[in-house]
Image (cartoon, rainbow, N blue to C red):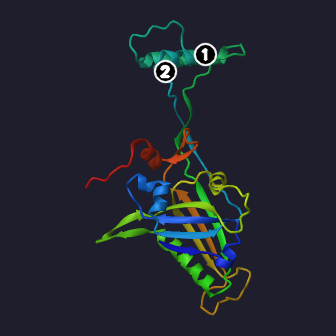
Amino acid sequence: MELYFYPSTEYFNQLPYIVNFYCSFYSLINKDRTRDGVQDRAFLQIQLPLPKEPGYELEHLFGEGANPVGPIFTMAGLANSGGLDNIELSSSILTQREVAATQAAFEAEFNNALSTFRRFANFSELTMHSEARKVYKFEYIFVPKNALESQAIEDIVGSFRKCSYPSVATGLPERTYPQNLWVFNISKSGGAPQNAPDPTTITNDWFGDPLVCVLKQMVVKKNDRADPITRLLPSGYSNVTLLGLVFEEFETGSFDSEEGTLRSKSEISFKYFGQSEIVE
């Protein structure tokens, strides 16, 4: 496995926490798509300082959908939607005429009732139709102090760039495999105090149980924006490199009450049904 890190060893060991980025190839097997599976199969590891403003973005998508209770097609739903009392149903499914009568009766009651109590119809409710895929943003400013660091920076930037693309299928140059999978976590470094919180706790609390991700966006800028002159090192590399990374979770997740944590779809599948196999 290839390993790149910044800053160099002398300064790296003074950091309290570091972020470990692991990258592995795409797979259809559920075990390989779990966080442990991606880390175990990783062909690349990049270690960087914990960013200044760690965090994430989360957005669930909701829409108005049919009430799962069934306000029209069940007796309970009919009563809850302001329907007529003692109505006799000739079948388990109401006819269009009876539906119209039920709605009209409710509307009349709603518009004319003087009581402070009214029966409201839940013909639709706000329903989640897409779980959130958390988004993570990292920003780094690399200022190499020696030739070793300047080379490490180019290796890090180049690795993120190359591994964000799909991979050519071996022996099938006209085909490609989907994009690589990423996981990241926090670990202690030499500068962490002895009573520092456990890295797993920091990872889960600060990043919201990060699941397997893909690298969605990358921004690279060379040199200092405030400096009107291009500054080069003797090696020909830039004296300042800005790197921006945007990761988005590969699969949606669900909360596992037994474990008290989030699980991706593949992790839930592997936990309850075991490893899936690809049949050729």
Q: Quadrant of the C terminus?
A: bottom left
Which residue appears farthest toward the left when viewing the image?
A: 280
On screen, residue 231 versus residue 174, left or right, reads right
Q: Which one is in front, 106 or 140?
A: 140
The residue singled out by tag 1 in the image is 108
Looking at the image, residue 268 lies above or below residue 244: above
Which is nearer the eye, 57 or 73? 57
Query: Of residues 29 and 192, which is closer to you in this image?
Result: 192
Q: Check disc 2 and give the amino acid type.
A: Ile
Residue closest to the eye, 17 or 164: 17
The answer to which image quadrant residue 8 occupies is bottom right
Q: Residue furthest top?
A: 86
Q: Position of residue 73 (x, y in %)?
A: 45, 20
Q: Looking at the image, which residue is at 66% across and 67% down? A: 189
Answer with left or right where residue 225 lies relative to residue 99: right
Relative to 247, say whether 260 is above or below.
above
Name the residue located 38 percent from the left edge and 54 percent from the top edge. Answer: 29
Q: Is residue 166 left or right of residue 277?
A: right
The amino acid pointed to by label 1 is: Ala
Of the two numbered discs 2 and 1 in the rendering, the one whose residue sits closer to the viewer: 2
- Can you give x and y, in whole percent of width and height, for residue 6 in the image? 63, 75
SS type, badge 2: loop
- Graded by Cα atoms within 10 Å as few (under 14), some (14 to 19) or many (20 or more), the crowding at tag 2 reads many
Q: Is residue 5 above or below residue 39?
A: below
Which residue is disc 2 drawn over?
72
Report x, y in % for residue 16: 70, 66
